[in-house]
């Protein structure tokens, strides 16, 4: 009750969305709060460096067909946020919880999940001190403690994830792709370079190798299909880009483990057009703005691939980077690990308090740009009327959506 009251006051006085502060107080008053709220539920956890919010939203849509469901839709993914999410739906027998990758051990112990989705591990922004290899060891040790019925849905294409889940009691493998391989070059046991051949990889010393996937994507010119060991199902996705399609595949595989029929899960996944402000175009003056998040080299890689492959080739492109607070704004070194060269031949607008550093990276990549000021919304207004793809780091992403909104109120079709 104390936590709910504090969350309500936070929202009432405009001090945030109340998605964490109430949980912090409840957790301070009783350390077992998360365990208490998770008891007697079937819980699915989703964790990764990138894509966990989108995958959790897609999985929640599919799992909602089973019955009432608790879900941390605001993305508050540490213990405090999970307490608030579970308390909001105290009687729901199911829960889908996006979980920060560094907090997996605490959350697994408290919730005893039925399904854990682990998609990727890579370097994150440096000011958080997040290291992919340390997290791989944390996952590895956490999964070794599982002594209850639990299935891990894991990415067989990411060697770090594959090594981390080697202690799990049961694994369903997904061909989740590994587009940023800089952090997974070595075998974690032998510390020798892995041998790669396309999607396949193996250690020449100990024989540690990629597992055959239980689920993969089959993309022809007509439709996207999820192929499993027991057949295939069409996977029409409303979200743009290859990364979102991979997220949908993980959500489908996890939903099946929860007991959802594949075709039912695919239908529900296809209905999601917006994830906390991502993807769906927002009306802003004469513009329809589609916002994508890029917080580290891997997510910059995925977001750049999405905007370069977009069917709306007439869309203006705005890249934005703020340096306010935590969330990738202090560390601009990560820009040099992302493939901005893929934007060559396209003129780009740049805005935000760290816009000059972003402009320097584009200059080195041979990309033409127009450098605006700190005000990202003013930079949008200066663009020609029509569609705008905006890719921003975490502070810039939040600054824009605080004005444009995060709900499902999007530009009419």
Image (cartoon, rainbow, N blue to C red):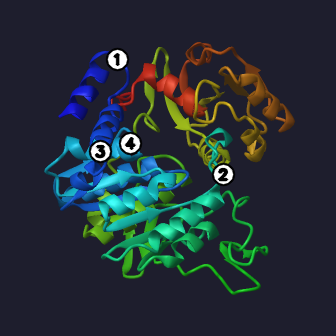
Density class for disc 4 (Cα within 10 Å; few <14, some 14-19, many ≥20) is some
The mark that comes first in sequence, 4 or 3, is: 3
The mark that comes first in sequence, 4 or 1, is: 1
Q: In the rendering, which numbered label is found on residue 123?
A: 2
Whether the residues at callouts 1 and 2 have beta carbons within 8 Å, the answer is no
The mark that comes first in sequence, 1 or 2, is: 1
Q: Is residue 412 left or right of residue 381?
A: left
Cα gap from disc 1 to disc 3, whole angstroms: 21 Å
Whether the residues at callouts 4 and 1 have beta carbons within 8 Å, the answer is no
Q: Name the residue under label 1.
A: 14
User: Depth-wise, is mark 4 or mark 3 nearer the camera?
Assistant: 3
The mark that comes first in sequence, 3 or 2, is: 3
Query: At numbered mark 2, what does the secondary structure look like: helix, strand or loop?
Result: loop
Report x, y in % for residue 51.
50, 51
Report x, y in % for residue 280.
43, 36
Q: Name the residue under label 4.
A: 273
């Amino acid at each position: 009750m104390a936590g709910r009251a504090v969350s309500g006051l936070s929202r009432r006085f405009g001090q945030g969305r109340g998605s964490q502060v109430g949980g912090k107080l409840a957790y301070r008053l009783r350390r077992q709060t998360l365990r208490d709220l998770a008891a007697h539920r079937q819980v699915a956890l989703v964790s990764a460096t990138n894509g966990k919010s989108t995958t959790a939203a897609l999985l929640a849509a599919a799992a909602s067909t089973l019955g009432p469901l608790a879900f941390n839709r605001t993305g508050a993914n540490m213990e405090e946020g999970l307490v608030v999410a579970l308390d909001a739906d105290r009687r729901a027998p199911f829960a889908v919880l996006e979980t920060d990758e560094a907090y997996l051990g605490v959350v697994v112990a408290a919730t005893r999940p039925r399904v854990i989705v682990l998609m990727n591990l890579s370097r994150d922004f440096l000011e958080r001190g997040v290291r992919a290899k340390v997290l791989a060891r944390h996952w590895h040790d956490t999964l070794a403690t599982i002594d209850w019925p639990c299935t891990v849905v894991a990415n067989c294409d990411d060697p770090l994830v594959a090594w981390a889940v080697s202690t799990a009691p049961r694994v369903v493998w997904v061909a989740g792709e590994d587009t940023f391989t800089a952090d997974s070059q070595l075998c974690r046991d032998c510390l020798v370079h892995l041998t790669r051949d396309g999607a396949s990889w193996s250690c020449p010393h100990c024989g540690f190798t990629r597992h055959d996937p239980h689920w993969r994507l089959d993309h022809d010119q007509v439709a996207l299909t999820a192929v499993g060991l027991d057949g295939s199902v069409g996977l029409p996705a409303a979200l743009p880009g290859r990364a979102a399609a991979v997220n949908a595949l993980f959500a489908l595989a996890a939903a099946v483990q929860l007991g959802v029929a594949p075709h039912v899960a695919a239908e529900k996944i296809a209905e999601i057009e917006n994830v906390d402000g991502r993807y769906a175009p927002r009306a802003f003056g004469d513009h329809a703005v589609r916002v994508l998040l890029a917080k580290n080299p891997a997510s910059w890689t995925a977001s750049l691939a999405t905007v370069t492959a977009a069917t709306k080739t007439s869309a203006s492109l705005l890249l934005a980077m703020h340096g306010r607070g935590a969330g990738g704004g202090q560390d601009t070194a990560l820009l040099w690990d992302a493939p901005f060269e893929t934007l060559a031949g396209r003129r780009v607008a740049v805005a935000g308090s760290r816009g000059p550093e972003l402009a320097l990276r584009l200059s080195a990549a041979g990309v033409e740009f127009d450098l605006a000021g700190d005000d990202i919304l003013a930079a949008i207004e200066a663009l020609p009327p029509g569609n705008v793809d905006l890719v921003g780091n975490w502070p810039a992403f939040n600054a824009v959506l605080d004005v444009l909104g995060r709900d499902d109120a999007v530009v009419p079709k």
